[in-house]
Image (spheres, rainbow, N blue to C red):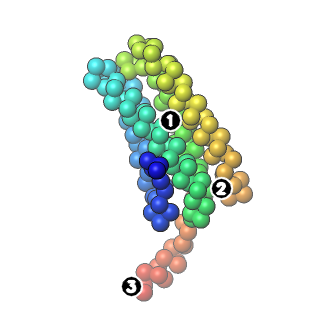
């Protein structure tokens, strides 16, 4: 029996999940900028990076399988952007001068390189699934006039 299975009746809020992961990635970036004590933060940072790597993989898999999702293409773009931010943070972990980086801990080099490969592979997969005819729209799905009309009924 698989450890994790998808319940197709389960509602997945891709936008919120991607936002939360992006926030966590930015928190790691902030930690790398600061002079954090590696005795306190190194293990937690690596755990967070592992979690983010796995979560991005799960979200991509679920997004690919959810072919009837409204604004699916937009979520592919959101996920693609989040992967870019994750790649940048992994680069900073591998090359940055921070106290929580590969510099003082060269044993992390292979682990970071593997996660970078995962992120690059996921971005390629996203590129294969993005519909170029359908770019993300900044326009609301419902115009303000339509929204006013709908709200007047309440």
The residue positioned farthest toward the front in the image shown = 1
As measured in the structure, the alpha-carbon distance from the residue carrying label 2 to the one carrying label 1 is: 22 Å
> Is label 2 in a helix, a strand or a loop?
loop
Taking depth in this image into account, of 1 and 143 the one nearest to the observer is: 1
Sooner in the amino-acid sequence: mark 3 or mark 2: 2
Q: Is residue 90 visible?
A: yes
Taking depth in this image into account, of 152 and 32 the one nearest to the observer is: 32
Q: On the rendered structure, is 89 left or right of 129?
A: left
As measured in the structure, the alpha-carbon distance from the residue carrying label 3 to the one carrying label 2 is: 33 Å
- The residue that disc 1 covers is 86
Sooner in the amino-acid sequence: mark 3 or mark 1: 1
> Is label 1 in a helix, a strand or a loop?
helix
Instruction: From this view, report whether residue 152 is shown above or below residue 82.
Output: below
Residue at position x 53%, y 53% in the image: 62
Say if mark 3 contacts mark 2, CB within 8 Å.
Answer: no
> Is label 3 in a helix, a strand or a loop?
loop
Label 1 crowd bin: few (<14), some (14–19), many (20+), radius 10 Å:
many
The residue positioned farthest toward the right in the image shown = 133
How far across and down, in percent of the image, does residue 54 sit? 47, 40
Instruction: From this view, report whether residue 116 is shown above or below residue 21.
Output: above
- The residue that disc 3 covers is 154
How far across and down, in percent of the image, does residue 133 sit? 72, 57
- The residue that disc 2 covers is 135
């Amino acid at each position: 029996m698989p450890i994790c299975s998808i319940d197709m009746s389960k509602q997945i809020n891709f936008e919120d999940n991607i936002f939360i992961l992006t926030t966590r990635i930015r928190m790691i970036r902030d930690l790398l900028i600061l002079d954090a004590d590696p005795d306190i933060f190194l293990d937690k940072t690596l755990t967070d990076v592992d979690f983010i790597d796995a979560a991005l993989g799960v979200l991509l898999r679920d997004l690919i399988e959810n072919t009837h999702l409204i604004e699916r293409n937009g979520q592919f773009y959101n996920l693609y952007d989040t992967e870019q931010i994750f790649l940048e943070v992994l680069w900073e972990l591998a090359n940055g001068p921070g106290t929580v980086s590969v510099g003082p801990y060269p044993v992390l080099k292979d682990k970071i390189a593997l996660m970078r490969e995962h992120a690059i592979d996921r971005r390629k997969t996203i590129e294969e699934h993005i519909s170029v005819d359908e770019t993300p729209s900044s326009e609301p799905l419902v115009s303000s006039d339509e929204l006013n009309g709908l709200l007047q009924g309440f």
